[in-house]
Image: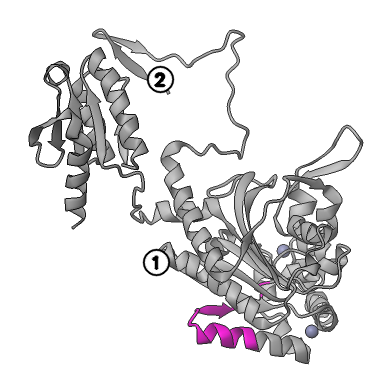
Amino acid sequence: MQKFIRNKGKIEEIKPFKSKNGKVFARLRGMKDVLPDEYRYWSLISKKINELTKTYGYKRIDTPILENAELYERSTGKTSDIIAKEMFSFIDKNDDKIALRPEGTPGIVRSYVEHGMFNLPQPVKLFWLGQVFRHDKPQAGRFRQFTQIDLECIGEKGPVIDAQLILIAYNFFKELQIDIMIQINSIGCSECRKAYINKLENYYKERGNRTKLCNDCKRRLGKNSLRLLDCKEDQCIAISADAPQIIDYLCEECKNHFVKVLEYLDEVEVPYNLNSHLVRGLDYYSKTVFEIWPIDADDSNVEVSRQLALGGGGRYDGLVEYLGGRPAPACGFGIGVERVILKIKEKNIPLKDDDQADIFVAQLGDQARRKAMILFEELRRAGLQVRQDFSKDSLKNQLEVANKLGTKYSLILGQKEIVDGTILIRDMESGIQEVVDFKKIRQEITKRLNNEIK
Ligand SMILES: [Zn+2]
Ligand SMILES: [Zn+2]
């Protein structure tokens, strides 16, 4: 598309900037720049999650972006889509296979084990926020580098933790005014799941069901049979509709655990939908699994919701031991930040601008500019919310900036005021201006701001 600009009355075409060798760089496919205008969404989200994690006792942890690729192959699972299709990995200069983390949990568990966190009072509650990388097909709300919030509670087997994590996720969305529904299921423990998978495999093999499955499912059957339940292909959804449900095969312990989780959720009035087809695609889950699906008033298409799940998680009682630690039951969840932002934008949820300032310092002429710069620093150091745009010469332009920033007062310093030793206070709403002794400006402006709060 051609773009034009008016230059001294003549219309000229804007030519894209070309470097000397003619190459113009663009970001990689599936990657995203977060521009200043969008950053207020990020601030909102980090403020909300910081508030919640503090209240529920989760402490911040960061882990490296690069890890040994085997960490993910062993924990997330070689047959999972994340590892089999989407992980960014490469061989480094030492011939080691390195991965850009495709999810948060394995690195957090590695850190728990490596730093002997089992010596700390249990459970250890961790909050993580970082970039993850998946070589996925880019689409709305889905990028190859994206950001996840992870909460992990390691060292506690009680079902109250599962319920509380779901409650935290629920509160997060509710307080951001995003309507969601929790989808929940139990996939049992390694013991009871075995019997169920047997039943499930028999079901898919009988009555010619197998031939109707998609190619992915044909391949998965017998290797990762649970995954057939959440395949998104129409023919597989139709066959899975009558598949046996794991709930009927849970052992006593798994069943009691699940019932308790649901009871706690009922108690704190978190709505949920029992979803017998929810399995999550990762190897390490056991017992409770859940996902957070958006509800759109005008959208009854469940498939769209599931593909754009805003987050999910579950229990992973065996992972810590599997990664070489002392056995420690655990539970956690992740939220995709970019998808949450997309929801906030879609729903036009009004955002408060926390960049609101009280005072704008404007100047006219070089001498006034110098004096205004000193005044600005003085007010800033006094803790006042003050703004400026000293690169502009025209008063009109400066007051426009002040208006945009929503400042209550502008302090205007011009040649006349310099000579008189005064300064103008302009009430930005009424436009009324008042001359004040320059030496008293700090007291004057503080007094007005204080009056306003009352
Ligand atoms: Zn069990
Ligand atoms: Zn399928």
At mark 1, the secondary structure is: loop
Q: Quadrant of ligand 2?
A: bottom right
Q: Does the residue labelled 2 lie within 8 Å of ligand 2?
A: no
Q: Quadrant of the N terminus?
A: top left
Mark 1 residue type: Ala
Q: Point out residue 55 in the picture as x, y percentages from the top left corner.
A: 52, 69
Among the 4 quarters of the image, the one containing residue 227: bottom right
Q: In which quarter of the image is the C terminus?
A: bottom left
* Residue at image mark 2: 2
Q: Earlier in the sequence, mark 1 or mark 2?
A: 2
From the viewer's perspective, is residue 234 above or below residue 133? below
Residue 275 in view here: no
* Residue at image mark 1: 297
At mark 2, the secondary structure is: loop
Q: Residues within 10 Å of mark 1 (few under 14, many from 20)?
A: few
Question: Is residue 267 or residue 273 the one in the foreground?
Answer: 267
Q: How far apart are marks 1 and 2 (CA)?
A: 39 Å
Identity of the residue drawn at 86% across and 70% down: 326
Mark 2 residue type: Gln
- Count of numbered marks: 2
Residue 268 on the magenta segment:
yes
Q: Point out residue 432 in the picture as x, y percentages from the top left corner.
A: 7, 37
Identity of the residue drawn at 80% across and 52% down: 84
Q: How crowded is mark 2: few (under 14 residues within 10 Å), some or many (20 or more)?
A: few
Q: Point out residue 48 in the picture as x, y percentages from the top left corner.
A: 47, 59
Residue 226 on the magenta segment:
no
Q: Point out residue 358 in the picture as x, y percentages from the top left corner.
A: 26, 42
Question: Is residue 262 or residue 201 the one in the foreground?
Answer: 262
Identity of the residue drawn at 28% across and 28% down: 375
Magenta residue span: 260-278
Question: Is residue 188 or residue 166 the one in the foreground?
Answer: 166
Q: Is 126 on the left or on the right of 325, as rendered?
A: left
